[in-house]
Amino acid sequence: MIRCRAAVVALALLVSILAAPAASAAAAPACATPAPSTTQPGYLVADPACNLDGTPFVALPGAQVHTGITGGAAYRIEVPAQWNGSLVVYAHGYRGTGTTVYVDNPALRAHYVARGYAWAASSYATNGYDVGQGVRDSVALIDVFGRVTGTKARSVIMSGASMGGHVTAVAIEEHPRLFAGAMPYCGVLGDTALYDYFLDANVTAAALTDVKIEFPRTPDASYQQRWRDQVGRIVPALGLPTGSTTAGRTWSAVLERRSGGERPGFDSAFTYWNAAPSLPPLADLPFLFGLYPGLQGGTAGIAPGNVTDNRHTLYRSTDRLWPATAEWRLNRDVLRVRRTATADPGLSGIPRVDGKPSIPVLSLHDIGDLFVPFSMEQKYATEAARNGRSRLFVSRAIRGVGHCDFTAPELTEAFDDLTTWLRTGHRPTGDAILNPRAVADPAFGCRFTRGTRSTFVAPACPSTP
C-alpha cells in the first residue's frame, strides 16, 4: 500500500510550507506555488526545484540537476560530473490519497552520485495506490533524461521502495528491454496477496475473539464507526499490543505464519505493529485494523471490485503435520470472502506481478515488517522458481521490525553487489527465504544486517571470527 509513516509527516510538512508566508528578500528564492495539473483535474504539482522544508533542491558537489514537470508529474534528475553512463530510475512509495503530488530524493542519492550513477525520480501524476501510473511516469523518465541532458543512458537500473517496489516489479516485466537490473526493497512483490494478508489478519482476529464482523462490498457511511466499535471489542480480547491472552497468543501465531513463517524477532514485531497507530482516517486503531479491506469493499481504492479472497485459505497456528482441534475451529468460524476482481495483467487497477524477471533483481526486506510483510519476498521467489527464473532473483533478509527500515550500509552494499552482478555476471549471495528451517533459525537475517535496531528483539547474531 504503501507508505512509510515518515511519508505522512512529509506530506503534512508540505502543506504547512505551502501555507507559510513568503520568505524575506534576503532568504533563498521561495518555492513556486504548486501548479494545477495538466492531466489530473483537481490535482496540484509541487515545485520539484524545492524541498519539502522550503529550501531549494541543489546539486551535490560536482553534479548537475534538472527539474521540471511533464505529463502532470514532477521530476528530478541528477548527473555526476564523472558520469559512468548508467541511470537509476527511483520509484517512491504510497503517499495517501491527497491531491498534491511531489518528488523527493532516493535514500541512495549520495551513493549513486559518488559511484558515477545518474538518477531520476518522479512524483507520479497521481497519489493513491496507483501502481500503473507510477510505472508510466517512471518509464517516461528514461526519455526525459535523454531530452534534458542531451545524452541517452547506456543502461538503466529500476529501483523502488514499498509501493515503489511494486512499480519496479511491474516495470521490468512490462518493459523488459529497457532495464539492465532492478533493486526493489520493502516492496509489494506479491500484488494482491498484500490485501489478502490484510484480510487474513482482521478476520482471524475477529474469529478468535467471537466478534461478528462483515465485509460490505459497498460500505455505507456508518460502516467505519461500526468497524471501530467491533475493533474496540477485539483489541482487549486479544490483550494487545503484546497478545497477552490465549486468543492473542493464537492470533500472533497465525499472523506469523501468514506473514512469512516462524522466524526470529517476531514477538517484538507483533508488539511494535500493534502499538503503532494505523493510517488516517483510522489512526485511532492499532495498525493492521485500520487496513481491513472491508473498509473500502476490497478495492484498495483503485481496483474494479474486491481483490481479496480467503475461501480456500487454511489458517494455522502451529506447524504440526495435521491441524489441531482449535485450528479446525478457527477455520470453521472465520469470515470467508470471495474476490470479484483480480490483479490486472496490464497497468490498470492493481497490476499483476508474474515473477518473470528477465534481468537480475536484488531485493531486501525487514523480516519483522508487518505492513508489507516478508511473505511478499517469498511469493515472488516462488513465482520466479515456477517460471525457471530463480537465478535472476536474490533476496536478503534484514533483522528489523519497521517498514523500509534499512541502514545506509545495507542499501549501499546491496546496490554495489547488484551493479557488480551486472558488470561481471557473478550472482551475489542471498538468504534461503523459501526454506522454513533456514527462516526459523535464530540467526536468520544476520548475514546481511548491518547495525542493530533496539525494537528488534531476538537472540544475538553469532560473532564472526
Image: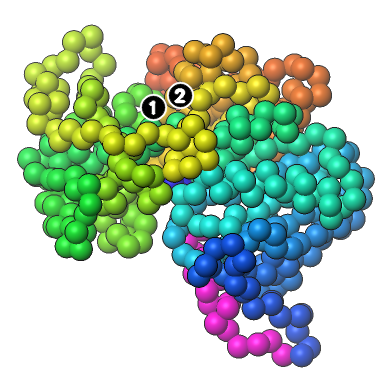
Considering only vertical position in the picture, is 235 above or below 25?
Answer: above
Q: Quadrant of the C terminus?
A: top right
Q: Main secondary structure of the magenta part?
A: helix
SS for tag 2? helix
Asked if the residue under mark 1 is in contact with the one under mark 2, i.e. CB atoms within 8 Å, the reply is yes
Residue 260's mark?
1
Report x, y in % for residue 61.
Answer: 86, 58
Q: Is residue 197 magenta?
A: no
Judge by depth and name the residue closer to the eye, 83 or 249. Answer: 83
Give residue 23's quadrant in the image.
bottom right
Whole-angstrom CA distance, mark 2 to mark 1, is 7 Å
Category of crowding for the residue at label 2, using alpha-carbon neighbours closer than 10 angstroms: few (below 14), some (14–19), many (at least 20): many
Name the kind of residue labelled 1 in the image.
Gly
Residue 452's mark?
none
Which residue does the image show at 14% across and 33% down from the upper left?
334
Which residue does the image show at 54% across and 63% down from the upper left?
40
Q: Is residue 433 left or right of residue 282?
A: right
Report x, y in % for residue 237.
Answer: 12, 45
Which residue does the image show at 70% across and 17% down from the upper left?
427
Name the kind of residue labelled 2 in the image.
Gln
Report x, y in % for residue 461.
Answer: 51, 27
Query: Magenta residues?
Result: 7-24
Judge by depth and name the residue closer to the eye, 358 or 305. Answer: 305
Report x, y in % for residue 238.
Answer: 16, 43
Residue 378's mark?
2
- Name the residue at the bottom extreme: 25
Considering only vertical position in the picture, is 246 above or below 64?
Answer: above
Considering only vertical position in the picture, is 436 above or below 202?
Answer: above
Which residue does the image show at 21% across and 35% down from the upper left?
337
